[in-house]
Image: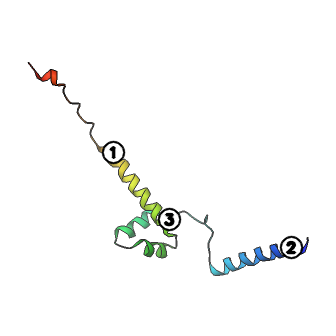
């Protein structure tokens, strides 16, 4: 290995060690519990507070909010009764 490769490998190892010690978890560590997130949001907490409490990013909180909104819209769309077709004006005349 040349010196440049060795320096790059040492820097990568150092970065991993610092990340491990500081408690930075990788993005793929786990799924977000959107039910818990929405419960806290509906309880009056702000996005930043929920993100700090759940130890997730604010983006994840916003995504949970979007999913909940989409689910609510989908369930409301299924509950709508089909509109009754309007009678033609010709049928109204005797």
Residue at (81, 73) in percent of width and height: 8
Horizontal side of residue 26 vs 77, given as left or right = right
* Distance between mark 3 and mark 2 Cα atoms: 38 Å
Residue at (43, 76) in percent of width and height: 49
Is residue 74 placed above or below 64 in the rendered structure?
above
| Residue 14 pos. (x, y %) | 75, 78
Q: Work out which quarter of the rendered image holds the N terminus and state it.
A: bottom right
CB of mark 1 within 8 Å of CB of mark 3? no
Label 2 sits on residue? 4
Please give the count of numbered marks on the rendered protein.
3
In this view, the residue in front, 93 or 17, is: 93
Q: Earlier in the sequence, mark 1 or mark 2?
A: 2
Label 1 sits on residue? 77
CB of mark 3 within 8 Å of CB of mark 2? no
Residue at disc 2, secondary structure: helix
| Residue 69 pos. (x, y %) | 38, 56
* Distance between mark 1 and mark 2 Cα atoms: 60 Å
Q: Work out which quarter of the rendered image holds the C terminus and state it.
A: top left
CB of mark 1 within 8 Å of CB of mark 2? no
Q: Residues within 10 Å of mark 3 (few under 14, many from 20)?
A: some
Horizontal side of residue 20 vs 35, given as left or right = right
Label 3 sits on residue? 60
In this view, the residue in front, 75 or 87, is: 87
| Residue 75 pos. (x, y %) | 35, 48
Residue at disc 3, secondary structure: helix
Residue at (26, 39) in percent of width and height: 81
Q: Residues within 10 Å of mark 1 (few under 14, many from 20)?
A: few
| Residue 18 pos. (x, y %) | 69, 80
Q: Earlier in the sequence, mark 1 or mark 3?
A: 3
Is residue 19 placed above or below 76 in the rendered structure?
below
Q: Earlier in the sequence, mark 3 or mark 2?
A: 2
């Amino acid at each position: 290995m040349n010196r440049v490769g060795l320096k790059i490998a040492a820097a990568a190892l150092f970065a991993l060690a610092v990340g491990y010690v500081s408690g930075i978890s990788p993005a793929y560590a786990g799924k977000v519990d959107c039910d818990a997130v929405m419960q806290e949001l509906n309880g009056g907490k702000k996005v930043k507070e929920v993100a700090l409490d759940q130890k997730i990013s604010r983006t994840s909180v916003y995504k949970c909010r979007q999913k909940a909104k989409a689910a609510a819209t989908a369930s409301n769309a299924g509950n709508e009764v089909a509109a009754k077709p309007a009678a033609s004006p010709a049928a109204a005349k005797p």
